[in-house]
Image (cartoon, grey):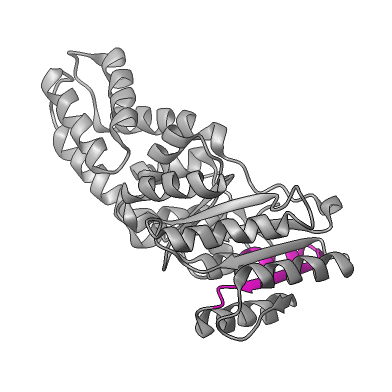
Amino acid sequence: MKIGSSSSDDSDWLSRLTNGLSRSSQKLGQSINDLFTQKKLNDETITELEDILITSDLGFTTASNLTKKIRSLKFNQEITVDEVKATLAAEISKTIEPFTQPIKINIEFSPHVILVCGVNGVGKTTTIGKLAQTYSFEGKTVCLAACDTFRAAAIEQLEIWGDRANCHVFSSETGKDPASLAFDALKHSQDIGADILIIDTAGRLHNKKELMDELEKIIRVIKKINSDAPHDRILVLDATTGQNAHSQVEAFIDIIDISGLILTKLDGSSKGGVLVSLTEKFGLPVHAVGVGESVEDLRPFDPDDFSNSLLGINTSK
């Protein structure tokens, strides 16, 4: 499944990804340019490069591993900016390649249940809408469950996406128990033979125990119908939060055993490097990245495309 690829070829996507990561690449690239202008690769430049990578949200472990690779290649020799960037891009690609895994839908589950969660404002409902539209265009029967029952606007937003994707949306009056709604949605999805059920949940701060307990309850209730559901438990993260995304992943893993990540708003951030440190620390699949509002702006990411775009390296396919 190629999210959002129905009306856009790979070169268009690469252009959007490059533009979306421009803030990150400008910040990282300019710092590297300034550092390696007519300088040898020595202890001083290695230390400064490591600091640049850390402040670009790649994380300490990733930064350390990358600078070790640079040191092994041309220590105490002249090195060009292009050589540094190319080496960093190649090593970053190697780091994230094992975690480049699109969502694998199994229609035999009838339905395949995807639970989507995250803190407030990360773009969960929009992400769900893009997924639903893509799956619907592929000919799958998709149902959506509006389990953010505390915000009328969230229900309305999901219904708009449902209309666009020709999907049935299960919703209720504001304030209904989210777990009860999820139960009813799964039951009905089974009855009509739907291929996919995507459950939208309320944005919740990861340090609010009562809200996290509610999320756990949703999972517990739907398991009464299907012990294997939800088949995917996806955490949506906002790239603009940078290293704060780590604490969010840790909290949600403890509660509901997150199975994969989607990173949104790369186009609004200079902190795109956080994707690299997240994969290295948690080992979770990154199903997709988002660089805009349209369906075509959410796609599974190619490790080479991402790494080159992050370093501001122009490539063509």
Is residue 147 on the magenta stretch? Answer: yes
Residue at image point 62% right, 61% down = 218
Q: Is residue 164 left or right of residue 80?
A: right
Q: Is residue 33 above or below residue 267?
A: above
Percent from the top left, x then y, of residue 12? 54, 58
Residue 236: in sight, yes or no? yes
Which region is colored magenta? 131-149
Q: Is residue 146 above or below residue 268?
A: below
Question: Which quadrant holds the C terminus?
Answer: top right
Q: Is residue 49 left or right of residue 186?
A: left
Specify the quadrant of the image occupied by residue 64: top left
Percent from the top left, x then y, of residue 44? 11, 23
Q: Is residue 203 left or right of residue 87?
A: right
Percent from the top left, x then y, of residue 298? 55, 59
Residue at image point 43% right, 62% down = 119
Percent from the top left, x then y, of residue 258? 55, 46
